[in-house]
Amino acid sequence: MSTRSLNKLRVEAATCRACPLWERATQTVFGEGKAGAELLLVGEQPGDQEDRQGHPFVGPAGHLLETALERAGIDRAATYVTNAVKHFKWVATEGRGKRRIHQKPNTTEVRACQPWLLAEIEAVGPRVIVCLGATAAQSLLGSAFRVTQHRGKPVASPYGPPIVATVHPASILRGDPEQREADLALFIRDLEAARLAAAEATSSPARRGSSSPPARGARAPAANR
Protein backbone atom coordinates (compact mmCIF):
# COMPACT_ATOMS: atom_id res chain seq x y z
CA MET A 1 0.00 0.00 0.00
CA SER A 2 1.38 3.40 -0.92
CA THR A 3 1.70 6.03 1.77
CA ARG A 4 -1.31 8.33 1.81
CA SER A 5 -0.81 12.05 2.30
CA LEU A 6 -1.68 13.63 5.61
CA ASN A 7 -4.40 15.68 3.93
CA LYS A 8 -6.01 12.56 2.50
CA LEU A 9 -5.84 10.82 5.88
CA ARG A 10 -7.40 13.84 7.58
CA VAL A 11 -10.32 13.83 5.16
CA GLU A 12 -10.87 10.08 5.61
CA ALA A 13 -10.68 10.30 9.41
CA ALA A 14 -13.31 13.04 9.52
CA THR A 15 -16.05 10.45 8.98
CA CYS A 16 -14.53 7.62 11.02
CA ARG A 17 -17.09 5.42 12.79
CA ALA A 18 -14.70 2.70 14.02
CA CYS A 19 -15.84 3.16 17.65
CA PRO A 20 -18.79 4.88 19.35
CA LEU A 21 -16.85 7.95 20.51
CA TRP A 22 -17.77 9.90 17.37
CA GLU A 23 -21.40 10.00 18.49
CA ARG A 24 -20.81 12.49 21.33
CA ALA A 25 -17.77 14.29 19.96
CA THR A 26 -18.12 17.53 18.02
CA GLN A 27 -15.66 16.40 15.36
CA THR A 28 -12.62 14.30 14.61
CA VAL A 29 -9.46 16.04 15.83
CA PHE A 30 -6.71 14.82 13.54
CA GLY A 31 -3.00 15.52 13.93
CA GLU A 32 -1.33 18.66 12.63
CA GLY A 33 2.14 19.41 11.34
CA LYS A 34 4.20 18.67 8.29
CA ALA A 35 5.40 15.48 6.69
CA GLY A 36 9.08 15.05 7.42
CA ALA A 37 8.90 16.51 10.93
CA GLU A 38 11.72 15.06 13.04
CA LEU A 39 9.53 14.76 16.14
CA LEU A 40 6.04 13.29 16.20
CA LEU A 41 4.27 13.91 19.52
CA VAL A 42 1.37 11.69 20.57
CA GLY A 43 -1.05 12.55 23.37
CA GLU A 44 -4.04 10.62 24.70
CA GLN A 45 -7.11 12.26 23.15
CA PRO A 46 -8.53 15.72 22.37
CA GLY A 47 -9.81 17.74 25.33
CA ASP A 48 -12.80 20.06 25.54
CA GLN A 49 -11.15 22.96 23.69
CA GLU A 50 -9.60 20.69 21.07
CA ASP A 51 -13.00 19.12 20.40
CA ARG A 52 -14.62 22.53 19.96
CA GLN A 53 -11.84 24.06 17.83
CA GLY A 54 -10.85 20.97 15.84
CA HIS A 55 -7.11 21.28 16.52
CA PRO A 56 -4.85 19.19 18.81
CA PHE A 57 -3.26 20.67 21.94
CA VAL A 58 -4.90 24.10 21.96
CA GLY A 59 -6.23 23.96 25.54
CA PRO A 60 -4.34 24.52 28.82
CA ALA A 61 -2.25 21.36 28.39
CA GLY A 62 -1.36 22.48 24.87
CA HIS A 63 -0.20 25.85 26.11
CA LEU A 64 2.01 24.16 28.70
CA LEU A 65 3.36 21.82 26.03
CA GLU A 66 4.26 24.79 23.85
CA THR A 67 6.10 26.42 26.75
CA ALA A 68 8.00 23.21 27.50
CA LEU A 69 8.92 22.69 23.85
CA GLU A 70 10.28 26.21 23.61
CA ARG A 71 12.35 25.77 26.76
CA ALA A 72 13.64 22.45 25.40
CA GLY A 73 14.83 24.15 22.21
CA ILE A 74 12.08 22.69 20.02
CA ASP A 75 9.95 24.69 17.61
CA ARG A 76 6.40 23.35 17.84
CA ALA A 77 5.78 24.46 14.26
CA ALA A 78 8.50 22.01 13.18
CA THR A 79 6.85 19.06 14.93
CA TYR A 80 3.80 16.92 14.20
CA VAL A 81 1.30 16.68 17.08
CA THR A 82 -1.53 14.21 17.33
CA ASN A 83 -3.38 11.91 19.75
CA ALA A 84 -3.79 8.17 20.12
CA VAL A 85 -7.57 8.68 20.02
CA LYS A 86 -9.11 11.25 17.68
CA HIS A 87 -12.46 11.89 19.40
CA PHE A 88 -13.15 13.52 22.78
CA LYS A 89 -14.50 11.12 25.41
CA TRP A 90 -16.31 12.96 28.17
CA VAL A 91 -18.96 12.95 30.87
CA ALA A 92 -21.06 15.94 31.96
CA THR A 93 -20.85 17.32 35.49
CA GLU A 94 -24.03 17.56 37.54
CA GLY A 95 -25.91 20.75 38.46
CA ARG A 96 -25.52 24.27 37.18
CA GLY A 97 -22.69 25.26 34.95
CA LYS A 98 -22.33 21.82 33.45
CA ARG A 99 -18.88 21.07 32.09
CA ARG A 100 -17.60 18.26 29.92
CA ILE A 101 -15.09 16.26 31.95
CA HIS A 102 -12.45 14.12 30.25
CA GLN A 103 -12.79 10.34 30.53
CA LYS A 104 -9.88 8.05 29.76
CA PRO A 105 -10.43 6.01 26.57
CA ASN A 106 -10.59 2.27 27.05
CA THR A 107 -8.50 -0.36 25.31
CA THR A 108 -11.12 -1.03 22.63
CA GLU A 109 -11.32 2.65 21.72
CA VAL A 110 -7.54 3.02 21.58
CA ARG A 111 -7.23 -0.04 19.35
CA ALA A 112 -9.98 1.20 17.05
CA CYS A 113 -8.05 4.42 16.48
CA GLN A 114 -4.58 2.89 16.25
CA PRO A 115 -4.61 2.45 12.44
CA TRP A 116 -4.95 6.22 12.06
CA LEU A 117 -1.95 6.80 14.31
CA LEU A 118 0.14 4.23 12.45
CA ALA A 119 -0.82 5.83 9.14
CA GLU A 120 0.25 9.22 10.49
CA ILE A 121 3.62 7.80 11.55
CA GLU A 122 4.09 6.36 8.08
CA ALA A 123 3.09 9.60 6.35
CA VAL A 124 5.23 11.86 8.56
CA GLY A 125 8.33 9.64 8.79
CA PRO A 126 9.66 11.14 12.05
CA ARG A 127 13.11 10.51 13.53
CA VAL A 128 11.64 10.10 17.03
CA ILE A 129 8.13 9.57 18.42
CA VAL A 130 7.37 11.28 21.73
CA CYS A 131 4.55 9.63 23.70
CA LEU A 132 2.87 11.98 26.16
CA GLY A 133 1.40 9.84 28.91
CA ALA A 134 0.58 6.19 29.47
CA THR A 135 -2.27 5.87 26.96
CA ALA A 136 -0.11 7.09 24.09
CA ALA A 137 2.88 4.99 25.12
CA GLN A 138 0.87 1.81 25.63
CA SER A 139 -0.94 2.28 22.32
CA LEU A 140 2.42 1.75 20.59
CA LEU A 141 4.46 -0.28 23.11
CA GLY A 142 1.84 -2.50 24.76
CA SER A 143 -0.05 -2.48 28.04
CA ALA A 144 2.96 -3.67 30.07
CA PHE A 145 4.95 -0.51 29.29
CA ARG A 146 5.39 1.87 32.22
CA VAL A 147 6.26 5.51 31.61
CA THR A 148 7.63 5.84 35.15
CA GLN A 149 10.27 3.19 34.42
CA HIS A 150 11.37 4.41 30.99
CA ARG A 151 10.59 8.13 30.76
CA GLY A 152 13.11 10.19 28.83
CA LYS A 153 14.90 7.15 27.41
CA PRO A 154 14.72 6.20 23.70
CA VAL A 155 13.05 2.81 23.37
CA ALA A 156 13.09 0.68 20.23
CA SER A 157 9.71 0.26 18.58
CA PRO A 158 8.30 -1.93 15.80
CA TYR A 159 7.24 1.18 13.86
CA GLY A 160 10.67 2.41 12.74
CA PRO A 161 11.74 5.41 14.82
CA PRO A 162 12.55 5.05 18.53
CA ILE A 163 10.01 6.19 21.10
CA VAL A 164 10.68 8.54 24.00
CA ALA A 165 7.92 8.40 26.62
CA THR A 166 7.15 11.09 29.15
CA VAL A 167 4.18 12.40 31.11
CA HIS A 168 1.21 14.19 29.59
CA PRO A 169 1.33 17.95 30.25
CA ALA A 170 -2.19 17.74 31.69
CA SER A 171 -0.83 15.64 34.56
CA ILE A 172 1.48 18.53 35.51
CA LEU A 173 -1.49 20.91 35.61
CA ARG A 174 -3.49 18.47 37.75
CA GLY A 175 -0.60 17.87 40.16
CA ASP A 176 0.50 19.66 43.31
CA PRO A 177 0.95 23.37 42.48
CA GLU A 178 3.99 23.52 44.75
CA GLN A 179 5.59 20.72 42.72
CA ARG A 180 4.63 22.12 39.33
CA GLU A 181 7.92 23.82 38.45
CA ALA A 182 9.90 20.70 39.39
CA ASP A 183 7.54 18.51 37.35
CA LEU A 184 7.81 20.90 34.41
CA ALA A 185 11.61 20.79 34.61
CA LEU A 186 11.54 16.99 34.38
CA PHE A 187 9.14 17.20 31.45
CA ILE A 188 11.45 19.63 29.65
CA ARG A 189 14.38 17.29 30.33
CA ASP A 190 12.50 14.45 28.62
CA LEU A 191 11.72 16.64 25.60
CA GLU A 192 15.39 17.63 25.40
CA ALA A 193 16.29 13.92 25.35
CA ALA A 194 13.91 13.43 22.43
CA ARG A 195 15.44 16.39 20.58
CA LEU A 196 18.94 14.99 21.06
CA ALA A 197 17.83 11.52 19.94
CA ALA A 198 16.34 13.04 16.77
CA ALA A 199 19.54 14.98 16.10
CA GLU A 200 21.60 11.83 16.55
CA ALA A 201 19.34 9.89 14.18
CA THR A 202 19.59 12.68 11.60
CA SER A 203 23.39 12.76 11.69
CA SER A 204 23.82 8.98 11.67
CA PRO A 205 25.19 7.71 8.33
CA ALA A 206 22.70 4.85 8.45
CA ARG A 207 19.77 7.25 8.70
CA ARG A 208 20.94 10.25 6.71
CA GLY A 209 19.02 10.62 3.48
CA SER A 210 16.54 7.91 4.35
CA SER A 211 13.08 8.02 5.85
CA SER A 212 11.74 5.86 8.65
CA PRO A 213 10.57 2.38 7.69
CA PRO A 214 6.85 2.12 7.06
CA ALA A 215 4.75 1.57 10.17
CA ARG A 216 3.84 -2.07 10.43
CA GLY A 217 0.18 -2.68 9.72
CA ALA A 218 -0.54 1.01 9.13
CA ARG A 219 -3.86 0.52 7.41
CA ALA A 220 -6.48 3.09 8.34
CA PRO A 221 -10.02 1.81 8.94
CA ALA A 222 -12.81 2.43 6.50
CA ALA A 223 -14.16 5.87 7.35
CA ASN A 224 -17.75 4.81 7.98
CA ARG A 225 -17.14 1.37 9.42
Image (cartoon, rainbow, N blue to C red):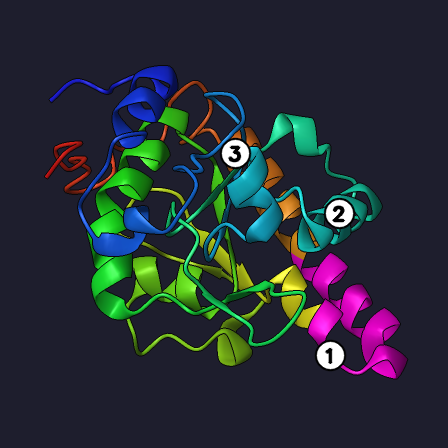
Residue 175 is marked as 1
Q: Which residue is mark 3?
A: 54
Give the quarter of the figure containing the C terminus.
top left
Say which label, 1 or 3, has the lower sequence index.
3
Task: Examine the rendered structure and indicate whether residue 50 appears above or below residue 101.
Answer: above
User: What amino acid type should be assigned to the residue bearing mark 1?
Assistant: Gly
Say which label, 2 or 1, has the lower sequence index.
2
Residue occupying image coordinates x 89% and y 82%: 178
Task: Examine the rendered structure and indicate whether residue 199 appears above or below residue 106.
Answer: above
Residues packed near mark 2 inside 10 Å, few (<14), some (14 to 19) or many (20 plus) = few
Residue 191 is marked as none
User: What amino acid type should be assigned to the residue bearing mark 3?
Assistant: Gly
Give the quarter of the figure containing the N terminus.
top left
Residue occupying image coordinates x 67% and y 65%: 97
Task: Examine the rendered structure and indicate whether residue 8 appears above or below residue 152.
Answer: above
Q: Is residue 153 visible?
A: no
Residue 28, image quadrant: top left
Task: Examine the rendered structure and indicate whether residue 38 appears above or below residue 44.
Answer: above
Cα distance in 3D space between marks 2 and 1:
16 Å
Q: Nearer the viewer, residue 57 or 180?
A: 57
Cα distance in 3D space between marks 3 and 2:
16 Å
The answer to whether residue 174 is magenta is yes
Q: Position of residue 135 (x, y in %)?
A: 41, 65
Is residue 157 toward the left or the right of residue 192 in the image? left
Predominant SS of the magenta segment: helix
Range drawn in magenta: 173-190
